[in-house]
């Protein structure tokens, strides 16, 4: 690690270390019981790459926190569950997780899985921070003041307008939407239609399909016949590659745009040539554009000895873990009831200088989404990786956004 990274790490943990040094005074022993925190996501199945990266980000944050003493000598213990990218497994594993003494949970990448499992956490009054799932309904199932569901991912209600605004600036106003029939596709379709409507536009074409399809030439042909000059996709799996490869086979030269799922390996590796030039909304691009991100990237490389497959999932998982741990530190009596953690998340006592953003007040009783539209940048696929689409995005990314 460079001197800059070392200095950053020291400054980041000085106040944590000071708290950790206080535990002997309070009569706590080094054998103090751990604080169990759940981590659930797709470690297998169609979105395993995103789930694995989410978990790695969480693990890095927890290891850093424990290394300086944790909560007054008590370490965080992760209880990890695999939702298999499937709603039924998500419900089953969430039920198991809630029986294992966890005080809060971080998890979910698939909107369809999250929507089925979220009521379990709400009923149990256990705070859940969702670091990946972007479907707008994830944080709107319950009235905000009563909700135990928080999110550190850019919801589609801000991703869709961000992308649509970029399309309109560049003259692409006849937009074809291809969306799968999962909860993610359904919610995303509604958000894109609403974003277009705000500009007085309607989709040139809407095509739906189930996950698992290997041929979408019919929908692509119909979209082309409408004169569409851009394709907005909403699907999380290999179907994105099916769309790109089908468009290329038709020699239809229009841009593919969409939300963060277009940064998944299923797309980049499944359509290595056809994905080139795709535009995708991103909260984090794996470039050392400032000290915090450089430190995070260096820590990841040192621990896992490989590049991130889904950088957004890793970064958002990392920040979500810290937001939770900062909330725990603000509970002075060590009694981690669900209502106490919820209140601590909604009324933070200290600013967290994160990888995605600087979080002064990420949540409140009436706002359960930490990320805002100004934290997004437009990414572009170049050589199988995501980089900044435009020079202005790269420049803007030098300045860390605040909430």
Image (cartoon, grey):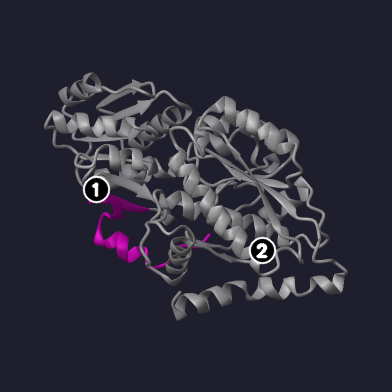
Relative height, residue 301 to residue 366 (above, below): below
Report which residue position mark 2 lands on. Answer: 66
Relative height, residue 169 to residue 1 (above, below): above
Q: Earlier in the sequence, mark 1 or mark 2?
A: 2
- Residue 153 visible at all: no
Residue appearing at x 38%, y 56% in the figure: 307
Relative height, residue 325 to residue 224 (above, below): below
Q: Which stretch is magenta?
A: 377-403
Residue appearing at x 31%, y 59% in the figure: 393
- Furthest-top residue in view? 218
- Furthest-right residue in view? 27
Residue sitting nearer the eye, 33 or 118: 33
Whether residues under marks 1 and 2 lie with C-beta atoms below 8 angstroms apart, the answer is no
Residue appearing at x 72%, y 42% in the figure: 126
Taking the magenta stretch, the answer to whether it contains residue 397 is yes
Please tell me the numbered disc located at residue 348.
none
Q: Position of residue 65 (x, y in %)?
A: 64, 64
Which quadrant of the view contains residue 286?
A: bottom left
Residue sitting nearer the eye, 37 or 277: 37
Relative height, residue 281 to residue 236 (above, below): below
Q: CA distance from mark 1 to mark 2?
A: 47 Å
Q: Relative to residue 241, is residue 338 drawn left or right?
A: right
Taking the magenta stretch, the answer to whether it contains residue 295 is no
- Furthest-front residue in view? 305
Report which residue position mark 1 lands on. Answer: 169
Q: Position of residue 78 (x, y in %)?
A: 65, 50
Q: Position of residue 45 (x, y in %)?
A: 47, 32
Q: Position of residue 80 (x, y in %)?
A: 62, 43
Disc 2 element: helix
């Amino acid at each position: 690690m460079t001197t800059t990274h070392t200095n950053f790490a020291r400054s980041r943990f000085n106040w944590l270390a000071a708290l950790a040094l206080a535990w002997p005074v309070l009569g706590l022993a080094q054998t103090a019981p751990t604080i169990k925190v759940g981590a659930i996501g797709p470690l297998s199945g169609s979105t395993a790459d995103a789930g694995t990266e989410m978990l790695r980000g969480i693990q890095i944050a927890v290891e850093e926190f424990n290394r300086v003493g944790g909560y007054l000598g008590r370490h965080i213990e992760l209880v990890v569950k695999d939702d298999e990218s499937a709603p039924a497994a998500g419900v089953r594993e969430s039920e198991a997780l809630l029986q294992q003494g966890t005080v809060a949970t971080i998890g979910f990448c698939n909107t369809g899985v999250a929507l089925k499992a979220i009521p379990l956490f709400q009923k149990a009054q256990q705070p859940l921070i969702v670091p990946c799932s972007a479907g707008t309904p994830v944080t709107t199932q319950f009235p905000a003041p009563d909700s135990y569901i928080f999110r550190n991912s850019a919801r589609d209600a801000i991703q869709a307008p961000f992308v649509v605004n970029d399309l309109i600036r560049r003259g692409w106003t006849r937009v074809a939407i291809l969306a799968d029939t999962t909860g993610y596709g359904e919610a995303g379709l509604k958000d894109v239609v609403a974003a277009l409507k705000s500009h007085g536009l309607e989709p040139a074409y809407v095509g739906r399909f189930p996950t698992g399809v290997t041929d979408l030439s019919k929908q692509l042909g119909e979209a082309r016949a409408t004169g569409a000059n851009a394709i907005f996709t909403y699907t999380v799996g290999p179907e994105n590659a099916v769309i790109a490869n089908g468009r290329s086979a038709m020699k239809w030269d229009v841009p593919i745009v969409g939300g963060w799922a277009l940064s998944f390996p299923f797309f980049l590796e499944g359509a290595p040539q056809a994905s080139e030039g795709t535009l995708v909304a991103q909260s984090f691009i794996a470039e050392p554009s400032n000290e915090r991100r450089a430190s995070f990237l260096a820590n990841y490389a040192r621990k896992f000895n490989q590049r991130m497959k889904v950088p957004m999932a890793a970064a958002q998982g990392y920040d979500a873990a810290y937001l939770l741990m900062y909330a725990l530190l603000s509970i002075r009596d060590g009694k981690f009831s669900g209502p106490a953690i919820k209140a601590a998340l909604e009324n933070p006592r200290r600013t967290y200088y994160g990888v995605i953003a600087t979080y002064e007040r990420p949540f409140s009783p009436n706002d359960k989404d930490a990320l805002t539209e100004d934290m997004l940048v437009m990414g572009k696929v170049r050589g199988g990786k995501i980089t900044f689409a435009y020079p202005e995005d790269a420049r803007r990314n030098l300045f860390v956004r605040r909430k």
